[in-house]
Amino acid sequence: MEERTRRKVRVGVVVSDARDKTVTVEVPVSFKHPRYDKVVRRSTKFHAHDESNDANVGDTVRIMETKPLSKQKRWRVVEVLERAR
């Protein structure tokens, strides 16, 4: 279990669940610009493995880094934090 503590964990919103056992998760990133001190907001999309097809569009999920599962999938859904209304 020591190894699992070093894996990256992100929280994001599911933007697509069209594929079987796969969801697309958008993770927002905000940082202060080094020169202009303005807050810059960006986002990154990750393809995550969802074995039980539990997550739906709009859900907030926690994803964890894992071994490559396909060409694009390097993450898996750990848990659904909040359901979409």
Image: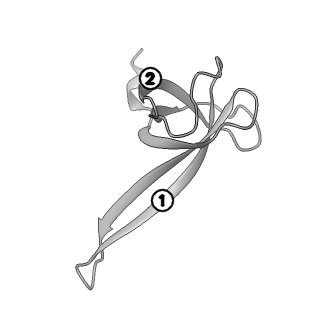
- Identity of the residue furthest to the front in this view: 85
Across and down, in percent, residue 54 comes to 59, 21
- Does the CB distance between marks 1 and 2 fall below 8 Å? no
Q: Which residue is mark 1?
A: 43
| Residue in the image at 42% along x and 40% along y | 10
- Side of 73 where 82 appears, left or right: left
- Residue 32 bears which disc, if any? none
| Viewer-side residue, 19 vs 33 | 19
Residue 1 occupies quadrant? top left
Query: Label 2's element?
Result: helix
Q: Which residue is mark 2?
A: 3
Across and down, in percent, residue 53 comes to 65, 22
| Residue in the image at 48% along x and 24% along y | 78
Across and down, in percent, residue 20 comes to 76, 28
Query: Label 1's element?
Result: strand
Residue 32 occupies quadrant? bottom left
Mark 1 or 2: in front is 1
Q: Is residue 72 above or below residue 62?
A: below
